[in-house]
């Protein structure tokens, strides 16, 4: 009999460590801060933590620029702190997934340093180092590829005609997975951490680890940056499957571990299924990006408000599409946002209806098919902090390189600030306020990134816990329900049907399993009517204190949401 996978009755939680809790006053969250909150997380009901990178790093990109995979980032603590974290998490039944960056290292990684210093070294072959092109005496990059950080994907190596490839920040050179020696290095790193007792990985940017052979120019038209963001050249190519299969054969398959890949680059569910198929896929799940940014926020600088409304039908259809292709053969994760997005409350919810919309978003996500992952701070209804100046957003390398382009294209300072406030991923990284004391109790020092102002007005963990109707208390109760064996069984095995999928305002679905579970959620900040012809056996979760159902029509108030047994 196939062994039951432990993540199938789990609820995940995403930790951005530098913003979680600082225990030593240096302004950065750390492992001991996190360890001191394991009871908090346990009480919340989550039992799988995906922790963003913990390795030694110069922190150009929040630790995704790794300097030493075998060393814990001193900002976060020591190796002993890490061992203690594993031990104490496990003692509470909490499993840990480390975030492993496979697509690039830091420029400060010894491999890269050696690659530059010794052109004949093995490490030179770990990276993409190529000669630039001389055109009319001008030195140009080897090809026209654009990085995800809005510049050429190539950086010149000073004093030479050589360039190195970086799909992300120029301080993060891409590594070459077609090189078997490089792949072995990563196998060893993964084995090392699994042997230390961690329970799996979130694999960063796996979509991009294979590049078009020969690194040719993209034939597509160049965009405003002067380059081409062409996912066909460096995303979701067939070799990704080969590399991960080898990784599985040599490493993952020997452990009872969960491996979740981050698959951007417009991956289709059909292609993703090859990676995560329970029988033949090398990893267990992928995070896709199809359910984020359904509010027109992506690349929305200069777009009018009317063009930036939540397209609920599309959102539902994306969930459905992935479900239809994958559910019979694969496990799936569910999430609204992570450290790469603005806060979901500001995207799909409403600050005006904070309590209602935070609960509505939770109910809607929690009972879809898959293993839910909550992003830190969602449980207290955190919204974007709306920092007052453009420079406040420069803590992110992506924003630093994006803003000059906007200025060149003539956008006003107000337009740029408005855009950053709405869309910057730094918004999701503002530190967690634990109370209404100084810096929200996050640190006794100067926080690496400012907190928003809201914690002073009750949006903090302590105030939330003290309010019986709060978001956090609702989270606790809802997660408890989600993990009940009979409900879990229905969610995972009962057929999922979307009800009135073309309804532009209401997100409703039914699981037809051992139980019949139905979610009905109004995603608008105004009242809407919804026809309803089922017999309600039980109201399991609800974010208002009365039910307006008359003659088979629900009157749903702003962000009203139900989980019903019918
Ligand atoms: C995805 C990570 O989630 C993001 O934060 C990072 O900037 C890129 N990958 C590059 O590692």
Image (cartoon, grey):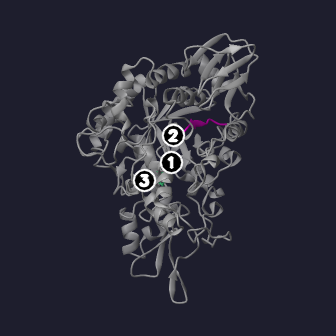
Some atom of ligand 1 lies within 8 Å of the CB belonging to the residue at label 1: no
Q: What is the crowding at mark 2: few (fewer than 14 residues within 10 Å), some, or many (at least 20)?
A: many
Q: Position of residue 318 (x, y in %)?
A: 68, 41
Query: In the orientation shown, which residue stands out farthest toward the bottom?
Result: 136
Say whether marks 2 and 1 touch (CB < 8 Å). Answer: yes
Q: Which residue is mark 2?
A: 346
The residues bearing labels 2 and 1 have C-alpha atoms spaced at a distance of 8 Å
Some atom of ligand 1 lies within 8 Å of the CB belonging to the residue at label 3: yes
Q: Is residue 436 visible?
A: yes
The residues bearing labels 1 and 3 have C-alpha atoms spaced at a distance of 23 Å
Q: Which residue is mark 3?
A: 64
Q: Between 386 and 133, which is closer to the camera in this rendering? A: 386
**Vertically, is 253 above or below 402?**
above
1 or 3: mark nearer the eye: 1
Give left or right: position of 78 versus 307. Answer: left
- Residue at (61% x, 20% y) in the render: 563
Q: Position of residue 285 (x, y in %)?
A: 59, 40
2 or 3: mark nearer the eye: 2
Q: Between 546 and 68, which is closer to the camera in this rendering? A: 546
Residue 37 belongs to magenta span:
no
Magenta-drawn segment:
330-337
Q: Is residue 190 visible?
A: no
Secondary structure of the residue carrying tag 2 is helix
Q: Which residue is mark 1?
A: 422
């Amino acid at each position: 009999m196939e062994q039951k996978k432990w993540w199938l009755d789990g609820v995940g939680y995403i930790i951005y460590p530098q913003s979680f809790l600082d225990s030593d006053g240096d302004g950065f969250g750390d492992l001991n801060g996190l360890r001191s909150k394991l009871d908090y997380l346990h009480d919340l009901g989550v039992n799988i933590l995906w922790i963003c990178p913990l390795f030694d790093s110069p922190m150009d990109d929040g630790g995704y620029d790794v300097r030493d995979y075998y060393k814990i980032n001193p900002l976060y603590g020591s190796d002993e702190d890490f061992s203690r974290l594993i031990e104490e998490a496990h003692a509470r039944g909490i499993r840990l997934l480390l975030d492993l960056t496979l697509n690039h290292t830091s420029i400060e990684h010894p491999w890269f340093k050696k690659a530059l210093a010794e052109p004949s070294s093995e490490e030179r072959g770990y990276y993409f180092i190529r000669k630039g092109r001389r055109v009319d005496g001008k030195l140009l990059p080897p090809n026209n590829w654009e990085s995800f950080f809005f510049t050429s994907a190539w950086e010149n190596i000073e004093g030479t005609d050589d360039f190195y490839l970086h799909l992300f920040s120029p301080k993060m050179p891409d590594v070459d997975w077609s090189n078997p020696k490089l792949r072995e290095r990563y196998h060893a790193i993964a084995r090392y951490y699994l042997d230390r007792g961690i329970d799996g990985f979130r694999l960063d940017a796996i979509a991009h680890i294979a590049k078009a052979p020969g690194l040719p120019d993209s034939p597509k038209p160049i965009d405003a940056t002067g380059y081409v963001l062409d996912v066909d050249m460096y995303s979701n190519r067939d070799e990704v499957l080969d590399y991960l299969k080898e990784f599985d054969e040599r490493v993952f398959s020997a452990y009872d571990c969960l491996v979740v890949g981050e698959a951007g680059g417009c991956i289709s569910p059909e292609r993703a299924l090859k990676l995560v198929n329970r029988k033949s896929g090398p990893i267990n799940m992928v995070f896709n990006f199809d359910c984020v940014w359904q509010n027109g926020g992506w690349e929305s600088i200069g777009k009018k408000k009317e063009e930036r409304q939540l397209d609920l039908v599309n959102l539902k259809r994306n969930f459905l599409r992935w479900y239809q292709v994958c559910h019979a053969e694969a496990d799936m994760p569910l999430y609204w946002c992570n450290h790469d997005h603005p806060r979901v409350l500001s995207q799909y919810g409403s600050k005006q209806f904070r309590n209602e919309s935070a609960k509505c978003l939770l109910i809607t996500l929690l009972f879809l098919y898959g293993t839910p992952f909550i992003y830190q701070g969602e449980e207290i209804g955190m919204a974007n902090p709306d920092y007052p100046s453009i420079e406040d957003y420069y803590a992110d390398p992506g924003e630093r390189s994006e803003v000059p382009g906007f200025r060149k294209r003539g956008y006003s300072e107000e337009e740029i600030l408005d855009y950053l406030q709405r869309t910057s991923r730094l918004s999701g990284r503002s530190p967690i306020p634990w109370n209404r004391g100084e810096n929200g109790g996050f640190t006794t020092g100067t926080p690496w990134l400012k907190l928003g102002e809201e914690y002073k007005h009750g949006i903090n963990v302590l105030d939330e816990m003290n309010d019986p109707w709060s978001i956090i208390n609702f989270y606790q109760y809802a997660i408890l329900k989600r993990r009940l064996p009979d409900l879990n069984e229905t969610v995972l095995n009962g057929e999922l049907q979307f009800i009135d999928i073309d309804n532009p305002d209401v997100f409703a679905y039914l699981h037809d399993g051992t139980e019949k579970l139905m979610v009905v959620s109004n995603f608008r900040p105004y009242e809407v009517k919804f026809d309803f012809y089922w017999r309600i056996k039980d109201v399991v979760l609800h974010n208002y204190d009365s039910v307006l159902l008359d003659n088979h029509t629900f009157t749903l108030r702003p962000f009203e949401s139900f989980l019903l047994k019918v």
